[in-house]
Amino acid sequence: MMSQTESRQNWVPEKFQHAADNLAQDVVKRFVKKRQVIGLGSGPMAACIVRALADFDGKETLECIPSSFQIKLEAMCSGLKVVNESEIPEIDVSFDGADEVDKTLNMIKGGGGALLREKVIHSGTKRVVVIAAESNKFVRTFTWPVPIEVNPFAVHIVRKKLEDAGGRPKMRMLKEGYPYVTQNGNFILDTSFDFASNELDIPQHQKRLKNIPGVAEVGIFTPADASSYIYYKAKEDGSFETIGL
């Protein structure tokens, strides 16, 4: 049985799937040009983007940097060129999804476990295109727990400090009963906060959590984490709204 986090990350409404595929085709046509470096997030929307890139005329000229092993395999199977991120100084455009987007366009990401690599990719990208379903991803205030990637040596100390900060951390587990381990060899503490009642300053909250020794990355993404964010609010009827264009 999948964990709640895994099931919510992978769940795509059936009505939205067709709209997501159409939207992926649209954003690739709009933002992708030959000989670009493309960043790829993780999750269902990134998979839709990979399928759209597979149909791009000139895909052999693209260089792709995936944030997760799953999307790397998907890209390779689609005939896309996957490159070592250490050889690329700058990324032209990145495509990603979100677990939640709040009213001020802060995001929670990391349901798929790739939050550290996703944030690195965002920070090195000229333009990040975020695609999410209007029906269950865009919210007034966050309801998801915040994924916090933690060095194993520090996990017990970090857990206590998160509790002191008002959080309720829970170790992310695999269905076999073992702790989930990221591609970076770290654990994830999915940590709930009372965002609605406490009216937290999200960017400052992110900084406080990131400053805890042993925390590798925090799954709160703010508009300051990339040069330019563009948000696509996808609707079940196939239409969409853009924010940031």
Image: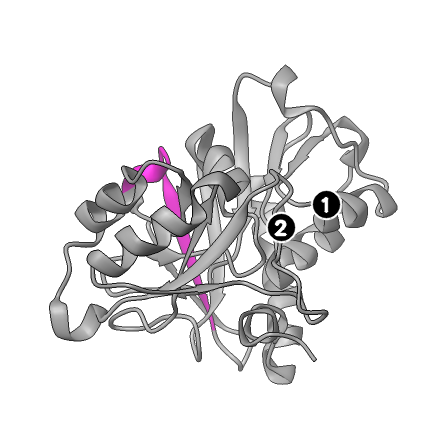
Instruction: Inspect the image, locate mark 2, and give the three-letter code of the amino acid beneath it.
Output: Val
Q: Choose top left, top right, bottom left or bottom right for residue 201.
A: bottom left
Residue 188, position as x, y percentages in the image: 50, 54
In the rendered view, tell whether residue 58 sits above or below residue 245: above
SS under mark 1: helix
Indicate the position of residue 190 as horizontal and vertical percent values. Answer: 43, 62
Q: Is 240 on the left-hand or right-hand side of 78?
A: left
Residue at the image point whose x is 80% and y is 38% from the top: 80
Magenta stretch containing residue 108, yes or no? Answer: no
Identify the magenta region.
224-234
Report the coloring of the rendering. one colour
Residue bearing mark 2: 181
* Residue placed most toward the observer, 234 or 201: 201
Q: Which secondary structure lies at badge 2?
A: loop
- Residue 69 image label: 1
* Of labels 2 and 1, the one closer to you: 2
The relative height of residue 53 versus residue 62 in the rendered view (above or below) is below
Query: Residue 163, relative to residue 89: is it above or below?
Result: below
- Whether pointer 2 and pointer 1 mark residues with C-beta atoms closer than 8 Å, the reply is no
Which of 204/30 is in front? Answer: 204
**In the figure, is residue 135 to the left or right of 14?**
left
Q: Is residue 12 left or right of residue 126?
A: right
Q: Looking at the image, which is closer to me, 186 or 194? A: 186
